[in-house]
Image (spheres, helix red, strand yellow):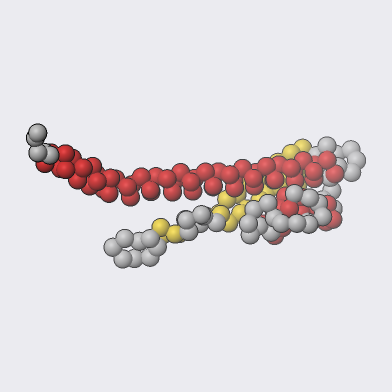
Amino acid sequence: MDAPSKTGKKQKGIATLEFWLTAPFLLLVVFAVSELGWAFSQYHTMTRAARDGARYMSSHALLGMGIVFLDSNRVQETSNLVVYGNTLGAGEPLLPGWSTGDITVTKPDATHISVSATYNYIPLIGQIPAFYGGEPISMAFVMQSTVQMRAL
């Protein structure tokens, strides 16, 4: 019988070394994809809520023949609808840290309603550590969405 060859042990050592060299890159890719998916999900929620608010306001803003009126109670109900998903403003916000102060309802012209929403995106990871000194890089940014509809 032959003695165990040294080639098999060398191959195991090379595979382990290759894993440890590529593992940080693979982890970075996994975290980046997770963060990007979370950001898209949050943006989709914000845009859908702004669209619902614009639809609600546009159906209640027309007083007569071409007269669009932004009643302060309707504006508050619209802001509540966008942030909380209901006109009463009850429950938890649809996005963490979102408030009705982040919603703007305007009348850009005589026949349209515009609902603008901003959201300070809160990342899952937080900050990217700075290598070789320096300040960490923040992953937070501001998302914005504006929906404009004709008053009905």
Identify which residue is drawn at 57% across, 50% down: 143
Quadrant, the N terminus: top left
- Residue 138, given in percent of the width and then of the height, sits at 45, 59
Point out the residue furthest to the left here: 2
Identify which residue is drawn at 40% across, 63% down: 136
Of residues 72 and 47, which is closer to you in this image? Answer: 47
Residue 110 visible at all:
no
132 horizontally vs 100: left or right: left
Of residues 7 and 108, which is closer to you in this image? Answer: 7
- Residue 69, given in percent of the width and then of the height, sits at 84, 48
88 horizontally vs 101: left or right: right
- Residue 56, given in percent of the width and then of the height, sits at 80, 43
Quadrant, the C terminus: top right
- Residue 88, given in percent of the width and then of the height, sits at 82, 55
Report which quarter residue 127 is drawn in: bottom left
- Label count reads 0
